[in-house]
Amino acid sequence: MLGKGVVGGGGGTKAPKPSFVSYVRPEEIHTNEKEVTEKEVTLHLLPGEQLLCEASTVLKYVQEDSCQHGVYGRLVCTDFKIAFLGDDESALDNDETQFKNKVVGENDITLHCVDQIYGVFDEKKKTLFGQLKKYPEKLIIHCKDLRVFQFCLRYTKEEEVKRIVSGIIHHTQAPKLLKRLFLFSYATAAQNNTVTDPKNHTIMFDTLKDWCWELERTKGNMKYKAVSVNEGYKVCERLPAYFVVPTPLPEENVHRFQGHGIPIWCWSCHNGSALLKMSALPKEQDDGILQIQKSFLDGVYKTIHRPPYEIVKTEDLSSNFLSLQEIQTAYSKFKQLFLIGFPPLPPYCGSDNTATLLFSPSSAYQLPSDNSTEFWDTDIKWFSLLESSSWLDIIRRCLKKAIEITECMEAQNMNVLLLEENASDLCCLISSLVQLMMDPHCRTRIGFQSLIQKEWVMGGHCFLDRCNHLRQNDKEEVPVFLLFLDCVWQLVHQHPPAFEFTETYLTVLSDSLYIPIFSTFFFNSPHQKDTNMGREGQDTQSKPLNLLTVWDWSVQFEPKAQTLLKNPLYVEKPKLDKGQRKGMRFKHQRQLSLPLTQSKSSPKRGFFREETDHLIKNLLGKRISKLINSSDELQDNFREFYDSWHSKPTDYHGLLLPHIEGPEIKVWAQRYLRWIPEAQILGGSRVATMSKLLEMIEEVQSLQEKIDERHHSQQAPQAEAPCLLRNSARLSSLFPFALLQRHSSKPVLPTSGWKALGDEDDLAKREDEFVDLGDV
């Protein structure tokens, strides 16, 4: 896959090695270089951020195209981040607008973003943890956003090496207490400076009014009610203070088993069917307690299963779907394909087989050697490694399960009840995907953010454990939310006009998981958040801490950069006047429906009594039994539903289904490949089209402003704002994270390891056969 993209970018032979060798020892020029660096680069600290340790004269390796060079600077560690302060900023094209994060810089790594730390001892790489008896000459940091940083400590003072390495290991690997996270230091220091974005209309679902609004929007208020029985978390700490249950369900039932075994409403379809979720009851061996649970579930079941009007299909995600262990194992293998490190560097001076440090007045030391070897070696077997990881297959299975549930709700008018042990992992994932496919409101930016608040944040997804922010249990670290974003990306990639947000929005959202100034992704439940922020504590005299939400995008990005989060291809819903809306009401409702030829009638109205017993056993954690429909029948219904929808024109404001055939499930290149220069194509991919669209939109907006100004006043129009994207030919296919390469050149086809393509001479002769995608 990677090789294919690079071949399209241009042909050529292996880049020749520079013949110049410098015999100036690095130790002889440290002083001058250090002075330059320290004068021009300063450490910027956030409110509440404290410097913990630092080391000077550290060499950072930089991989660009097929060339590797180093930059001297300071390596610092604070209670928020690891930062490298080098003098490489001057090498950037300052005239080109950059997509910069205002909180985390290019050379910054938040402590929560650190995945693994390695040290190099005598050219051997070892994992670093705990107390070290010997300190490495090279430090390698793998990040959770798949960046790889390498620092040479060979020329750093021994005391500073001990201090910086020990500090980084301790503050990134050692178990932490929740109150010791930087989240609380920042909240305390920035208490009076916290400003929320007035344009952020995301529904937070932390009030009863929010849930009532959602019920009214989806017409779910006909059969369901918002309850405040858990206000103050007096019934269950796992559930939010407010949620929605079926109207006939007595509120006292919620108290019986502390919220377990209660069908909680997620969303209602236009035809009246609904999506619900339920957490399993505790597994008991005592026959008396089991009988009580059975009787309780029997009553709950009757409230949501009333043939012929309410037919319920159950989906046991704990027993019959993915396991968290499968997700964790697959992603562990998958991410290794993108953690392309740099090969160990030889000494600074030597024979033909060793690289040399070339002196440069800008404190950069060139390290010429063939450093893309690891990339190309991986690329040759990339497809087989990708398949063996099973990550893309897991994505396909998630999308397929969501389509199956959509078919039950849309074509068969059935309620669907999702079952899981705590209803906080796969329930969040599948219910969110179903709503994204069925509800066009969830495909707007505000709607999508509100969906995450409702299903993930208030739904009790354990972000603290799943992201392992406290470093207390690696087995609990499972990228369930990242899996959801990857599934969403598949939909965005296949149907761009249906989404108001871009893949860049999804990428920066995934990065925000590890920025501890936003409370959105740093707690296991609303109760844990409110308790630790002082809202539910016993100390009523202290003022509750207020934290930013991740939805305040102005905290991270300037207005110009935020335009890249909004999709210029989005097809907005046409606005109708009152007369048209009244006449089109019924037709509009059916537009939300699947374009089927003729939907089948419901198979059988209800379960037999013995099937009800099996369902109750299922809810009690016992082995699931087959329901009325056989697996073959379900597969036939799914295939007819799936094929029929894809045979009709797409309604971007109606039902939206993804293609799930093997080749259609792709790698989210922008997120996973953005730090690998060899995988970038200059001027290629969709970035050229997107940049032109943005230029046109800016031009239209500028002209509209001029017309408005001339209409309302006689003042001369203001000067035009600089365009965010000037030249699409200079952009990378992984824009905006790879805007410009400082030493950019056309990708070079490897000449070693590709024996199937022919000899080096053959490749040189075939150079003209390859076409640069930037010219297409």
Image: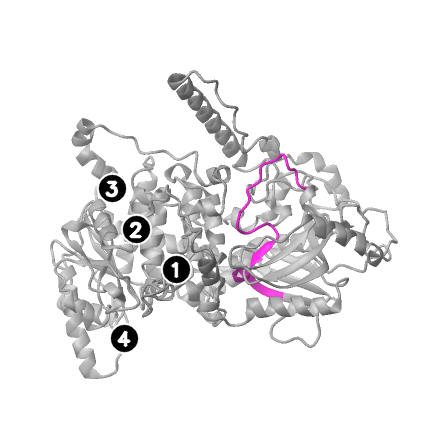
Label 1 secondary element: loop
Q: Write down the region rendered in magenta.
A: 92-117
Marks 3 and 2, the one that precedes in the sequence: 3
Q: Is residue 550 above or below residue 612?
A: above
Mark 1 neighbour class, 10 Å CA radius: few under 14, some 14 to 19, many 20 or more: some
Query: As rendered, which of 154 and 39 lies closer to the eye?
Result: 39
Q: CA distance from mark 2 to mark 1?
A: 49 Å
**Which callout, 4 or 3, points to the residue nearer the camera?**
4
* Residue 595 placement (x, y as % from top left): 27, 39
> Which residue is the site of mark 2?
638
> Which residue is the site of mark 3?
593
Q: Does residue 104 belong to the magenta stretch?
A: yes
The residue sitting at the front extreme is: 541
Marks 3 and 1, the one that precedes in the sequence: 1
**Which callout, 1 or 4, points to the residue nearer the camera?**
1
* Residue 86 placement (x, y as % from top left): 69, 51
**Which callout, 3 or 2, points to the residue nearer the camera?**
3
